[in-house]
Image (cartoon, rainbow, N blue to C red):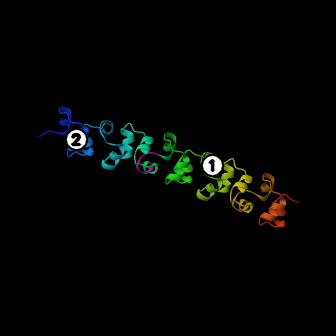
Amino acid sequence: MKVTCNELLMNMKVTYNELVMHMKVTCNELVMNMKVTCNELVMNMKVTCNELVMNMKVTCNELVMNMKVTCNELDDEHEVTCNELIMNMKVTCNELVMNMKVTCNELVMNMKVTCNELVMNMKVTCNELVMNMKVTYNELVIHMKVTCNELVITMKVTCNELVMNMKVTCNELVMNMKVTCNELVMNMKLTCNELVMNMKLTCNELVMNMKVT
């Protein structure tokens, strides 16, 4: 008979679910050819959000935009990782943190998102990375495009903390950072003697580069 799926639903005691289960009608056809929204499929049928994404021409983004499904529910209830949300959906890292139960740390640990990308693309300062995440000063320097000097200038990190908490020698502070020998003595708990003992500085260099008579 010339009976459409829509007519079956409207005029007969046939549910959406029965159409999919007993008839050669895919979920996708229901959406494409019938006046059935994705939301109705999830609400009224035994179709999970995950099945919508896997078996239908419905992107994760469409699920969020057109359905009463939050990004957080997508992550919790189906096989969609945070990374897939970013890759396949118009969801920025920042939105994940702001709108979802995803910490900055989880973004770094479970996703293909580097600490550096967090700083560059998100409203997250280096300082917040250290304070709120399991990221040490050393990791900031090693894994991120953040120089020791930026740590001192941009963050509330003293030269002393750099030496104490990071794998940064006094010598590296002078060589790689805009920190003079004099500043090392003035701002850090380092004596002139320690400068000579722990750094590749001769007595003559101490006199030349520092205010030491």
The residue that disc 1 covers is 130
Is 198 drawn above or below residue 37 in the view shown?
A: below
Q: Which residues are magenta?
A: 86-91
Q: Is any part of residue 158 visible from this angle?
A: yes
Q: Residue at x 45, y 41 (%)?
A: 72
Q: Residue furthest top?
A: 11
Q: Amino acid at mark 2?
A: Leu
Say whether residue 46 is left or right of residue 103.
left
Image position, residue 193 (x, y; %): 84, 61
Question: What residue is drawn where x is 80% and y is 61%?
Answer: 195
Structural crowding at the residue carrying mark 1, measured as other residues with C-alpha within 10 Å and reported as few (<14), some (14–19) or many (≥20): some
The tag earlier along the polypeptide, 2 or 1, is: 2
Count the marks: how many?
Answer: 2
Rendered image: mark on residue 211: none
89 part of magenta stretch = yes
Quadrant in which residue 62 is drawn: top left
Q: Residue furthest left?
A: 1
Q: Is residue 9 left or right of residue 210?
A: left
Amino acid type at circle 1 is: Val
Badge 2: how crowded within 10 Å, few (<14), some, or many (20+)? some
Tag 1 secondary structure: helix
The residue mark sitting in front, 2 or 1, is 2
